[in-house]
């Protein structure tokens, strides 16, 4: 499991201009089961995405496709963690510690 933290590197006017493309990118990855939750940070200086993914390299490649990244509007911090405890609704994503 991954926490993807976005931090804007441009003003909100430029971010807003690319927001429709970013939202379409998010929707594609919700549809394919990769993204589980997302939203704006408070204060609005970026966002957070909770992602299920196979490996870090694949997730980093996915992040590089974000229209915000391609337009030079944000930086990502990718944090991988093992979701060993979840709410019942997230049980399919529960992970085991390595042996």
Image: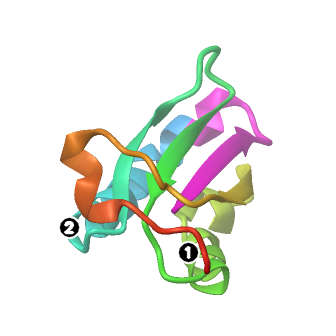
Badge 1 or badge 2: first in the primary sequence: 2
Please give the label number shown on residue 65: 1
Q: Residue at x 65, y 78 (%)?
A: 56
Residue at 38% in and 64% down: 25
Q: Relative to the observer, which residue lies in front, 51 or 1?
A: 1
Badge 1 density bin: few <14, some 14–19, many ≥20, Cα 10 Å: few
Mark seen at residue 31? 2
Element type where label 2 sits in the image: helix
On screen, residue 26 versus residue 27, left or right, reads right
- Report x, y in % for residue 96: 48, 68
Q: Nearer the viewer, residue 19 or 55?
A: 55
Q: Is 54 rendered above or below residue 44? A: below
User: Crowding near pointer 2: few (<14 within 10 Å), some, many (20+)?
Assistant: few
State which quadrant residue 81 falls in: bottom right
Which disc, if any, is residue 30?
none
Compared across the picture, whether 77 is left or right of 37 comes to: right
* Residue 10: quarter of image: top right
Find residue 9 and report its image quarter: top right
Q: Position of residue 41 (x, y in %)?
A: 58, 25
Of tags 1 and 2, the one toward the viewer is: 2
Residue 69 at what x, y percent from top left?
66, 62
């Amino acid at each position: 499991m991954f926490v993807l933290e976005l931090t804007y590197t441009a003003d909100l006017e430029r971010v807003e201009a690319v927001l429709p493309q970013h939202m379409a990118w998010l929707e594609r990855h919700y549809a394919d089961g990769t993204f589980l939750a997302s939203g704006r940070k408070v204060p609005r200086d970026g966002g957070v995405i909770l992602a299920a993914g196979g490996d870090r390299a694949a997730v980093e490649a996915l992040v590089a496709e974000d229209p915000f990244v391609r337009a030079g509007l944000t930086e990502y911090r990718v944090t991988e963690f093992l979701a060993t405890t979840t709410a019942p609704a997230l049980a399919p994503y529960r992970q085991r510690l390595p042996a």
